[in-house]
Structures are given as C-alpha cells and as structure tokens.
C-alpha cells in the first residue's frame, strides 16, 4: 500500500512537471537582456548599432536563420566568439540547409580546437552546397594537418577545379599553410598541369608576338652579306704626305669598259 502511494505521488509530480513550459523550447532567449548587450554603445559605434538592431529583430523573429547568421558574424567582430557560435548553431537549427551558417560555425569551432565539430560543419556546408570551394579547401587543410595526405590532395584538387581563387593568397590567405598544394595542382590537371602553371606568368610587354616566333625561312647564301677584308697590301696604300706637300688624291676604282 505504501509503495502504491509513493508511485501515485511520483506520477502526479511528473505530470505537473510536464505541464510546465520548457525554458529552452518555449521561451525566446532574446526576451531578456543578453550578456553582451551591456557592452554595446550604439550611439558611438556602427558595429554596436548593427548588433542592437539584429537583437531587436530577433526578439520579434526568433526563428530567422539569416538574422542568426548575421548576428553571429557581428559578434565575432565584436570579440564574442562563444555567443557567435551559439548564433550560428541557432541559424542551422532554424534552417539546416543554410550552408553559410554551417561554414561560419565550422570556422568558429576550428578556431577553438573543436576539430570533430568543425569537420562535421564543413561537411554539412559542402553537402548543402557541393560547389563550396572554400569549405573543401578547409577540409583539405584539416586532412593535411592530420597527415591524411591523399584525402587532403583530393579536397584541394576539388576546390581548385571549382574556383581557382583558392590559390590566390589575397582571397585565401591560408593557402600558404599547405605544403602539398603543388601535388593538388597535378591531380586537378593531370594532363595539362604544365600549361596551367604557365597562366601564372604574364607575357612581357617589351616583346611582340612576332619576335617570340621562330623564323619561318632560312636566308639563302646569296642574301648573306659578308664584309670585305681590310686592304693590307703596302703597294696599294696611298703615300704618306711629307711636310709641306699636298696629300695625293686617293686612287679611284677603275671604271669597267662599256660593252
């Protein structure tokens, strides 16, 4: 009897707990003042004003994936990486197909050493956007760091085929972190990698196209002009004039007779 009474009380308590609203499921986290809001000064900072604007918008639309993703990027600029990561997670929870949020989430996770979480998020970014060259490149860097070189070369080659900009240090500064990117170029272009490498060199403007071409014909012997040897016969040299004498005129070549 006592045991039955205990079970009944437990059932009533459980039912009462289930009837209470779940704090994370039903509440809007933006209804309260957020931790970082006390560090904002929207009147003097454009960045702070943008953060305050997105927070206000999320209080009205807490399930907007694009707003979560935008706020996450702003919080990263402000120096709140943990809060930014939470925003990116909320973005992909609101819309799992939002590949930019997956990519941003992967970058934040990788920056704090969460290799497993970062690899998963990069993979989701590629899954929902197969042409995401930057996500493929980041997966290549992670594979190279883990000494999975064949996988790394494959990721790099796929990224290069999709977008050559991954090779430009101005667009992708992390390209200098790879020691095997040249092998990826060969895999990406196995038949014409030499031709592709020539694209990195510009033709000098001081040379015309014609000057770079080989001569089409060899000049005939009759067209070759050979300079005459100097006259070394003493008897044919003009006399040296003595002091007070007028120099003798130089001998003129004989005129051949007319036919």
Image (cartoon, rainbow, N blue to C red):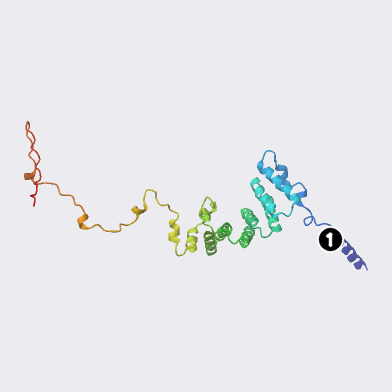
| Residue 177 visible in image | no
Residue at horizontal 37 percent and vertical 53 percent from the top: 209
Q: Quadrant of residue 23?
A: bottom right
The residue indicated by pointer 1 is 18
Toward the viewer: 220 or 106?
Answer: 220
Q: Position of residue 37 (x, y in %)?
A: 72, 44
92 relative to 77, above or below:
below
Q: Quadrant of the N terminus?
A: bottom right
Toward the viewer: 241 or 157?
Answer: 241
Mark 1: give few (<14), some (14-19) or many (20+) Cα within 10 Å.
few
Element type at mark 1: helix
100 relative to 245, above or below:
below
Q: Position of residue 152 (x, y in %)?
A: 54, 61
User: Left or right: 199 with respect to 85?
Assistant: left
Q: Quadrant of residue 234?
A: top left
Outermost residue to the front: 259
User: Left or right: 50 with respect to 223?
Assistant: right
Q: How many marks?
A: 1
Residue at horizontal 86 percent and vertical 62 percent from the top: 15
| Residue 197 visible in image | yes
């Amino acid at each position: 009897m006592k045991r039955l009474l205990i079970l009944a009380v437990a059932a009533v308590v459980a039912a009462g707990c289930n009837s209470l609203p779940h704090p994370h499921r039903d509440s809007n986290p933006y209804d309260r003042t957020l931790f970082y809001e006390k560090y904002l000064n929207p009147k003097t900072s454009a960045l702070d004003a943008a953060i305050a604007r997105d927070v206000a918008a999320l209080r009205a639309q807490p399930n907007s994936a694009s707003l979560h993703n935008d706020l996450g990027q702003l919080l990263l600029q402000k120096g709140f990486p943990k809060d930014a990561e939470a925003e990116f997670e909320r973005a992909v929870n609101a819309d799992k197909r939002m590949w930019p949020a997956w990519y941003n989430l992967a970058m934040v996770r990788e920056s704090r050493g969460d290799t497993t979480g970062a690899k998963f998020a990069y993979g989701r970014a590629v899954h929902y956007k197969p042409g995401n060259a930057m996500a493929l490149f980041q997966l290549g860097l992670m594979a190279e760091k883990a000494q999975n070189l064949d996988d790394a070369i494959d990721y790099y080659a796929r990224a290069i085929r999709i977008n050559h900009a991954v090779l430009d240090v101005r667009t992708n500064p992390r390209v200098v972190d790879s020691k095997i990117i040249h092998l990826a170029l060969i895999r990406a272009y196995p038949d014409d990698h030499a031709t592709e490498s020539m694209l990195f060199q510009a033709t000098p403007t001081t040379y015309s196209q014609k000057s770079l071409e080989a001569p089409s014909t060899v000049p005939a012997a009759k067209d070759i002009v050979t300079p005459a040897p100097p006259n070394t016969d003493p008897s044919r040299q003009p006399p040296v004039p003595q002091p007070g004498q007028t120099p003798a005129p130089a001998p003129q070549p004989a005129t051949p007779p007319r036919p």
